Image: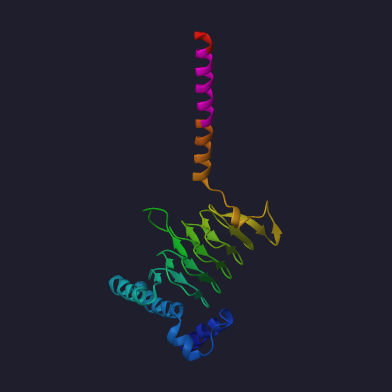
Amino acid sequence: MFKRIKEDIDTVFDQDPAARSSLEVILTYSGLHAIWAHRIAHAFYKRRMYFIARIISQIARFFTGIEIHPGATIGRRFFIDHGMGVVIGETCIIGNNVTVYQGVTLGGTGKEKGKRHPTVKDNALIATGAKVLGNITIGENSKVGAGSVVLKDVPNNSTVVGIPGRIVIQDGVKIGKDLNHSDLPDPMLDKFLALENQIIQLQKEIEKGAVYNDNKNL
C-alpha cells in the first residue's frame, strides 16, 4: 500500500512542475485524493458492497469535485490535473500512465446495459473539457484535444480534435488539413446566413414583380 502511495506522489511530481513538496501534494492535490478514495470504494464494489462504495465515491465527489464511479477500473500512475468537473463512468477501463485534465467526461451515450463507457489505454492524454462518450477505445499513446467530443474509436499513437472528434495526426503523420481552433465551424451562423440570403432573394423577386406591375398598368 505504501509503495503505491509513493508511486502516486512521484507521478504528481513527474506530471506537475508546480508540485514543490510531498506534504503539499498529499494535502492539497484533489486529483490524488479522488484516486485514493476510488481505490477504497472500488474494493467495496468488487465485494458487492455497492451502497458503501457509492457513499465513499459521493463523499469524495463532495470534497474534490471529481466523480469516479466505484465500478471503474483504473490502472497505475493515473494523474488527474486540477480535476474539477471530471466524471468517470461505471464501466470505464483506464490503463497505466493516463493523464486527464479538468472538465473531462468519460461517459455513456444512453441507457444501454453492459460495457457502455470508454476504454482508455496506456499513456493516453485527454485534455481539458474533452468528452469521450460510449463504449469506444482511446488507443495507446493517443491524445484527445481540449473541448473535443469523441464518439468513435481512436487508434494508437493518434491525436484527435474537434466536434465531433477527428484524427489529425496518426503515427506522427498529419492527416487532412490542420484544425484552426480560432476558425471552428458555426452551424447556427451558417443557417442564419442561408436564411438571410433567401430573404434577400425574395425581396428582389418582390421588387421585380412590383416594377413589372407598374409598367403593365402604364
Describe residue 142's horizontal placement relative to residue 105 as left or right.
Answer: right
Residue at (57, 79) in percent of width and height: 15
Above or below for 73 versus 163: below
Which residues are the magenta region? 200-214
The outermost residue toward the front is 218
133 and 136: which is toward the camera: 133
Rendered location of residue 13, percent (x, y): 56, 84
Above or below for 113 versus 5: above
Describe residue 186's horizontal placement relative to residue 38 as left or right.
Answer: right
88 and 19: which is toward the camera: 19
The image's colouring method is rainbow
Rendered location of residue 34, percent (x, y): 41, 77
Number of marks in picture: 0
The outermost residue toward the left is 51
Rendered location of residue 10, percent (x, y): 55, 85
Q: Is residue 210 magenta?
A: yes
Above or below for 181 versus 45: above
Residue at (52, 22) in percent of width and height: 207
The N terminus: image quadrant: bottom left
Residue at (52, 90) in percent of width and height: 21
Q: Is residue 51 magenta?
A: no
Type of secondary structure dominating the magenta stretch? helix
208 and 57: which is toward the camera: 208
Rendered location of residue 146, percent (x, y): 54, 63
Above or below for 204 versus 69: above
Residue at (59, 58) in percent of width and height: 160
Residue 17 sits in quarter: bottom right
